[in-house]
Image (spheres, helix red, strand yellow):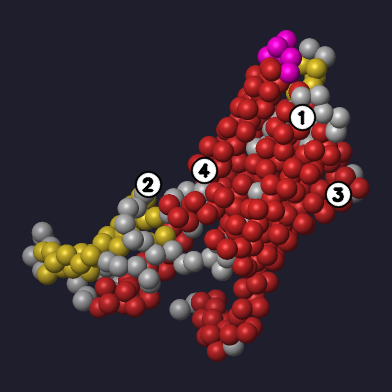
Amino acid sequence: MTSLKKTKEKINNYLYDHYTLKQALYHGKGFFFAAISAFIFAFGFTCFISSAKEITNDEYFKIITGGISGLSQNIAKIVEICGGQLDHITIEAIGYTVFNIPLIIFSFFKIGKRFTILTAINVGLSSLFIYLIPQMNINVKIGTSFLIENQPVARVIFGGMCTGLASALAFKGEISCGGVDIVTYYFSLRKSTSVGKYGMIFNGVIVTLYSILIIIDDHSKYDIAIISLFYSVCYIMVVVFIIDTINLRNKKVQLQIITKSNNVSKALLAHFPHGATVVKAEGAYSHSDQTMIYMIVSSHEVKSVVTLARKIDPHAFVTATSLIQVYGNFFIRPVQ
């Protein structure tokens, strides 16, 4: 065992004996993920998305980011079509707050108290950073330094990467960035599948609706509506790809362990909250008795399972196969 593993084991043993300190570090880790996630989101939104408007036929088109902010943009557009007097910024700000309140309440009762509190902190820090970043002139420096100030495709890619990374880091810390992320996180837990596809469905409806509203408002702007839809969909696809690449909580892997030891299956059941299927087998070459263990685990558990199995039987043969979906009872540690 390396010195690093020994140090890690000592720290884990110490924390098991000091529960209060362990909980404090756990919550501190959540706050750290909330702060980093909020800054990355605010950085991407301020530097690449909020000013990502390009002139086409002397008209401006907007990139619709989806989510609660995108829903608020749709409400603002409907009010404009109906002849309302309030400006877009005011309506979007009111809508963002109004739509987030029931989601926060829903999160508190259906997901977890810690999840809700840290999500609220994440949303608050995002708003703070969005306000502070332009004051530091970061967005101007980024736009001119990388020569993407007038490049909508580059803005969409970098903005989508920042938003996707922010959401993925939040999910990794068992929190969210608020808004639709709360709903997608809830459904991913209930359905035990990837988070991104639920966000893709909702956001696809949001951006399509906004493009339709542009055409309803002025039939001559159909080209602007199509361009807006194209860039918005590209943005959402980048976000979804990043989230599902990094967030491994709901990804499943089937492990097949071939061993001569009868203790491997007992050890796996003692250390991991998953069932296993044991099949007696015979080696084709040696004709010796073998045990085949089939076990489904989360992606982040694979390394730990393999390490434990090979610790008991150094000659164990292990294969891992990624799974699309699992039907039936599969335990996932609940979110606090």
Q: Position of residue 85 (x, y in %)?
A: 86, 30
Q: Mark 1 is on which residue type? A: Val
Task: Find numbered disc 1 in the image and state the secondary structure of the residue it sits on.
Answer: helix
In the rendered image, which residue does mark 4 sit on? 198
Label whose residue precedes the other's in the sequence (3 or 4): 3
Identify residue type, mark 4. Tyr
Determine the CA span between mark 2 and mark 1. 42 Å
Q: Which residue is mark 2?
A: 324
- Farthest-out residue, bottom: 17
Residue in view at x 46 percent, y 61 percent: 300
Estimate how packed mark 3 is, as few (under 14), some (14 to 19) or many (20 or more) residues with alpha carbons within 10 Å: few
Residue identifier under label 1: 79
| CA separation in Å, label 3 and label 4 | 29 Å
Work out whether mark 2 precedes mark 4 in sequence or the reverse, and give the earlier one.
Answer: 4
In terms of sequence position, does the residue under pointer 1 or pointer 3 come before the other? Answer: 1
Using the numbered discs, state the Cα–Cα distance from disc 4 to disc 1 in whole angstroms: 28 Å
Residue 220 percent across, percent down from the top left: 73, 10
Q: Earlier in the sequence, mark 4 or mark 1?
A: 1
Quadrant location of the C terminus in the rendered image: bottom right
Q: Three-letter amino acid code at disc 2? A: Ile
Helix, strand or loop at mark 3 = helix
Q: Which residues are magenta?
A: 217-224
Q: Secondary structure at mark 2?
A: loop
Task: Residue 28: give x, y in percent of width and height.
Answer: 68, 72
Which residue is located at x 63 percent, y 53 percent? 103
The residue beneath circle 3 is 131
In this view, the mark in front (1 or 3): 1
